[in-house]
Image (tube, rainbow, N blue to C red):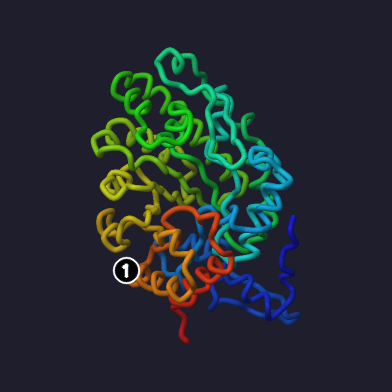
Amino acid sequence: MPGLPNMTETPSCLRICRNACLPEMYAMGPDDKLSCVSLPDAPLLRAARRESVPYTPVWLMRQAGRYLPEYRAMRERFGFLELCRNPEAAAEVTLQPVDRLGVDAAILFADILLIVEPLDVGLEFPRGEGPLIQRPLRDEAQIARLRPIDVASAVPFVFEAARRVKQALAGRVPLIGFAGAPFTVASYVVEGGASREYLHVKRLMYEEPEAWHRLMEILATATSRYLNGQIAAGADAVQIFDSWVGVLAADDYRTFVQPHMRTLIHALTPGVPVIHFGTGTAALLPLLRAAGGDVMGLDWRVDLDTAWASVGHDVAVQGNLDPAVLLAKPPYIRQRVKDILDRAGGRPGHIFNLGHGVLPATPVEHVRALVEIVHELSDRRVR
């Protein structure tokens, strides 16, 4: 694993540990060692609880990804699934952006489809392509033969990776666990991969609703166990990715998805913040809020202030810079960050993030600049 900062070196470690500690509560001991507040007071966790924070916390979806040269070097050594199944390597990849960028959280390196491998659907990740399902599930007979997923035996490597990351972080920043939402995971296993129209999914929902609900029940149960396993291994918060749910009409979401999301979120370990994220969800946000979650993740297609009002200010929000903005130079990034922070209005409960994942072509220095700009412009301490 990459070397961690030496927390006894001061004062340079003040900058490194800033993400895990409330800045106004740094304290120097007699041996110039740094002490800081406990992890529950980390800005990201405080923001998730809609408590006051010294600055807006920021982390990025896909912050461990192909834009990082150190990640690309790892991929030269490991195939994608091989990397996911290697706890030591997955932990190293998880830690890379924390060390490089100064983000306010680590997010566990894994994939949303790992838990479907026991369904014998033939999961593959061809190099340079997205996931492929060789044996998609498209009819009632196939789904009737499915058995519950034994999560503990399916993904022990994910839980081991989480334990390793938690130990290596040593309280510097929170660890975020994650999983795919049942609808998005079902979309892959029914369509056979990514889709534009999701016609197989919709046909199954409309023509064979009992089979659809059985599939969703299996996935919701497995996902709750998967996330609770990550929490038991050290995750301080979890995010549920419903990346494709924006293809649904409101009535379809209400009928075919929302009950399963409620069941899933209700089954998660109490007291651990849940971030509920989807893309293309402007018309669905109140329904996602009703399904549950402590933080509503927003994509870049909505104005943050309008979206926050639509879900209610009694819930936190996360977002929502267009990932493509990071292809521009820092002065423009600064302008767009300021607009989002202005829309948040200093209200407790905002976690800064992109509206989806970091794009592979993004310059690393632009990502680092984004983190610094968010921290600078949102700094609420007396200057």
Specify the quadrant of the image occupied by residue 302: bottom left
Q: Position of residue 75 (x, y in %)?
A: 68, 47
40, 239: nearer the viewer: 239
Q: Position of residue 281 (x, y in %)?
A: 32, 47
**Above or below 37: residue 278:** above
Specify the quadrant of the image occupied by residue 194: top left
Q: Amino acid at mark 1?
A: Arg
Q: Which residue is mark 1?
A: 343
Residue that sits furthest to the bottom in the current view = 383
186, 52: nearer the viewer: 186
Q: Position of residue 124 (x, y in %)?
A: 59, 32
The residue depicted at 34 percent of the width and 67 percent of the height is: 344
User: Does residue 198 appear in this view?
Assistant: yes
Query: In which quadrant is the N terminus drawn?
Result: bottom right
The residue depicted at 47 percent of the width and 68 percent of the height is: 328
Specify the quadrant of the image occupied by residue 105: bottom right
Q: Position of residue 309 (x, y in %)?
A: 26, 59
Q: Is residue 62 left or right of residue 213?
A: right
**Above or below 260: residue 62:** below
Q: Is residue 328 left or right of residue 70?
A: left
The residue depicted at 49 percent of the width and 14 percent of the height is: 145
Q: Secondary structure at mark 1?
A: helix
User: Does residue 220 appear in this view?
Assistant: no
For mark 1, does the 10 Å Cα neighbourhood hold few (<14), some (14 to 19), or many (20 or more) residues?
A: some
Q: How many marks?
A: 1
The residue depicted at 54 percent of the width and 36 percent of the height is: 131
